[in-house]
Image: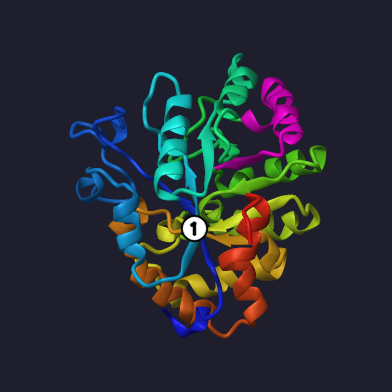
Amino acid sequence: MAHWLDGIALVDGHHHFWDLGRFPYRWLAPGAPPARFGDKATISRNFLPEDYLAAFGALPLAASVHVQANCGAADPVEETRWLQELSEATGWPTAIVAEVDLTAPEAEALIGRHLGSPALRGVRTPVAWDAAGRWRVADRPGVLSDDRFRAALALLEDQGLCLECVVVPAQLPEVLELARAHPGLTVVLNHFATLEPDQPGNLQDWHSGIAALAEVPNVVVKLSGLWTVDRGWDAAVLRPHVRHLLQSLGASRVLYGSNLPVEGVNCPLARQFAQLEQVLGDQPGEVLAEVFSGTARRVYRLPG
């Protein structure tokens, strides 16, 4: 284990499992469009707890959070049930973030069915939309302010579930408004809010948007999916952006996620930790403990 994480019971706040014989995973199929993150060939195979644990090796992994993997099931509850079975059989994952389109008429009923799995801690819903057309996961802009979407948030709050989203930097003001309107809801922004410094206006939108989120304590940002910032997680590239995030929000609102196996296409786990040591190794122990364990434990209500 890297000495800079000594004494920290590591929580991986974002990863995926898949079984290609169980669900379609159309985005991984041979004829699927290419992925922006790179060659999918190396991850177009089963990725299950034994593969995941092998990747972590000697690192002191204590808990993990599985985020829905766009499995393509006709009923997304089937993925959650499968993950619950894996959790009970192997101990992994510890917590589950399920797939729900909160704009759908059946959203509340779907959340209720996901709740049949005790490890459920949140839902991820498609909201990303950018003017340039690079990131359009939602079917239209403005989903975060959609009336049906907002109505479904009440059920998430009632059940203590978090809302997970992939957003682009230009959407951060929409996140701010939503968080103000729903102060009892924890909003978790995946993958560093998709910072792409080489895209026009992106860094400025991200920098100001992250700074503005300081006023809403119910928004958390994942230190994950950093391939959009730099494919190899080069520490010199990451450092100013990671420091801005920590200075704006504080370590108690930042959590690490491996994004395995997707992130491994560009940055294997060992390199992730080597680069993060260069970025964060000089931080106080309490900061590291929050980013790599404490924040995720609170957000996902994990033991320990």
What residue would you read off at disc 1?
257
Q: Is residue 144 magenta?
A: yes
The span picked out in magenta is 143-165
Position of residue 16 relative to residue 110, above or below, is below
Residue, far top: 105
On the question of residue 9 being in view, the answer is yes
What x and y, as percent, mark residue 137? 47, 33
Depth check: give the residue in front, 171 or 106: 106
From the viewer's perspective, tell me whether residue 141 is left or right of residue 50: right
- Up/down of 182 relative to 100, above or below: below
Look at the image and say whether residue 171 sits in the magenta stretch: no
Q: Position of residue 264 (x, y in %)?
A: 32, 58
The image position of residue 53, as x and y in percent, is 35, 59
Give the residue type at disc 1.
Answer: Gly
Left or right of residue 93: residue 160? right
The residue at 75%/43% (across/down) is: 179
Residue sitting at x 70%, y 33%: 156
Q: Residue at x 40, y 58 (%)?
A: 227
Q: Is residue 133 visible?
A: no
